Amino acid sequence: MNASSPDTPRPEGAEPPHHLTTRLVHHAYQAPAGFMAPQPAVHKASTVIFPNVAAMRAREWKDKTSYTYGLHGTPTTYQLEERLATLEGGLQCLLVPSGLAAIANVALALLRTGDEVLIPDNAYGPSKALAEAELLHYGIRHVIYDPLDPADLAARITPATRLVWLEAPGSVTMEFPDLAEQVRICRARGVTCALDNTWGAGLAFAPFDLLGDGTLGVDVSVHALTKYPSGGGDVLMGSITTRDQGLHLRIKLAHMRLGLGVGANDVESVLRSLPSMALRYRAHDRAARDLARWMARQPAVAQVLHPALQGSPGHEHWRALCGAGEGGEGAAAGLFSVVIDARHGQQAVDAFCDSLRYFKLGYSWGGPMSLVVPYDLPGMRTRSAGHLRPGTVVRFSIGLEAVEDLRADLEQALQSAFGGH
C-alpha cells in the first residue's frame, strides 16, 4: 500500500489531503495489533496525541494509567520502570538521567530550608559535593556520620533531620555497614532513609526486605543504571524506587517540576541488558574475588578492601545481609580496592596504574572493560579512617576479560612499579 492508494484507510467521510506533504504527515495507515518480539518496542515522543478534548482533560500521568507528554512517560519507559521496581522489590520507580540525578531528585523532593540531611563519611563523592554546595545554598544543613558506628548515626539525628543517606558498601574504601541496624535507628526516630543501592543492584540483597520477613527495609533505593543494568559503559541513567505511594508521589512531583527525562534509545539499551544482568553480576563477582585474594598476597599491598573477604571492614555485616551467613558464597559486585603500602610513594603508585595494559584508567564500573583509579583518600574523608592501613588507595573495577589475563597484567605492573617489594 502506498501513500496515494485508494485503499488507504481514513476517517469516515473524510477526503484525502490534496498535497503529498500533508498526506505524509497525516497518513492514516495503522500497523495491525498483535506484534510481539523478545524486546519491547521503542516509543519516542515529546508530543502525545489525544483523540479528543475530553481525553486530553481526563488523562492522568501520575499513576501510569495513560499518557500525556513524553517527559511523563511512554510505553517504553513504563516497561523499564516496572521491571526495575520488580528487581529491587519496590512498587514504584522513576527514571532519571543519572545516578547523581536520582540522589538530587530525592534530596530536592524531601528537604526544605532549615532541614538537615545525614550522609556517611564514605558516601559517593558527588553526593557529598551536592550537599556541600547546592543544598547549602538552599539553607539545608548536612552532617557527616561514621558508617561503621550505628551509635554515631543515632547521636547525630536531631529534630531537624529529615533524610539519612545509606551506602552499602561505602564508596572506594568498601566498608560494609550494619545496614539493618541503621534502618532500625531511622525507623525509631521517624526519619526517612534512602540507600544508594548501585553496588547491590537489587541482586546482592533486597533493600526493602533486609531481614527476609518483610518487616524491615529502606524507604528509598536509588540506583545508577549506568553500572550493571546497562552493562556496556555507554549509558547514563538512574532510578528511584519506593514502596510507599505518598513518598513516591512527592518524589515524582519534584521529578516533573525539575523536568527530568531520559532518552528512549538509552531505555532500550537498559531493557536489552536487564535479562543478562544476574549472569554478568555473578561473573564480575567471581573474577573480583579471585583477583582480590591474589592481590592480598602481593608484597606491595598492605590491605585489600572487599566486603566478601575476611578482615575487610564490615565483612560480618556483608555475610549476614548478602547470604553468605547461611553457608553459601553470597553475592558481591565486581569492585575492590587495595591500599598500596605507604613505603611506596604516589609517584610509584601512579606508575603502577600507568603500567597496566588491560585495566584502563577511567571512572564508573559495571561494564565489560576492567578499570583502575588511584585515589587521594584524605581529601575525600572528613575523619581519619583508623581501620585502613597507611598507604594509597587504588580501586579496581573488574570487567569481563579472562581472569588469567587480568592477573598477568597486575603482576607485570606490580613488578614494573615496585619490583619485589
Image (cartoon, rainbow, N blue to C red):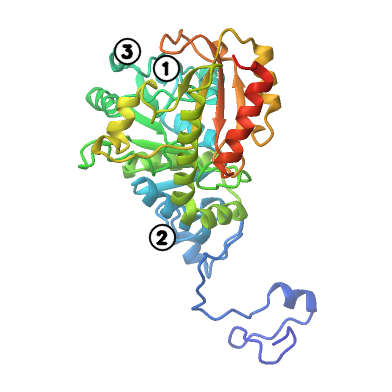
Task: Name the residue rendered at 73%, 83% in the picture.
Answer: 3
Q: Which residue is mark 1?
A: 114
Placement of 201 over or under 391, stated as above or below: below
Q: Is residue 361 above or below residue 323?
A: above
Looking at the image, tell me whether mark 3 or mark 1 is earlier in sequence order: 1
Residue lying at the far bottom in this picture: please name it.
Answer: 6
Q: Secondary structure at mark 1?
A: loop
Nearer to us in this view, 259 or 53 = 259
Is mark 2 in CB contact (under 8 Å) with mark 1? no
Mark 2: secondary structure: loop
Q: Name the image quarter holding residue 199.
A: top left
Q: CA distance from mark 2 to mark 1?
A: 37 Å
Q: Secondary structure at mark 3?
A: helix
Q: Which residue is mark 3?
A: 152
Which residue is tagged 2? Answer: 65
Q: Find residue 171 and name its label.
A: none
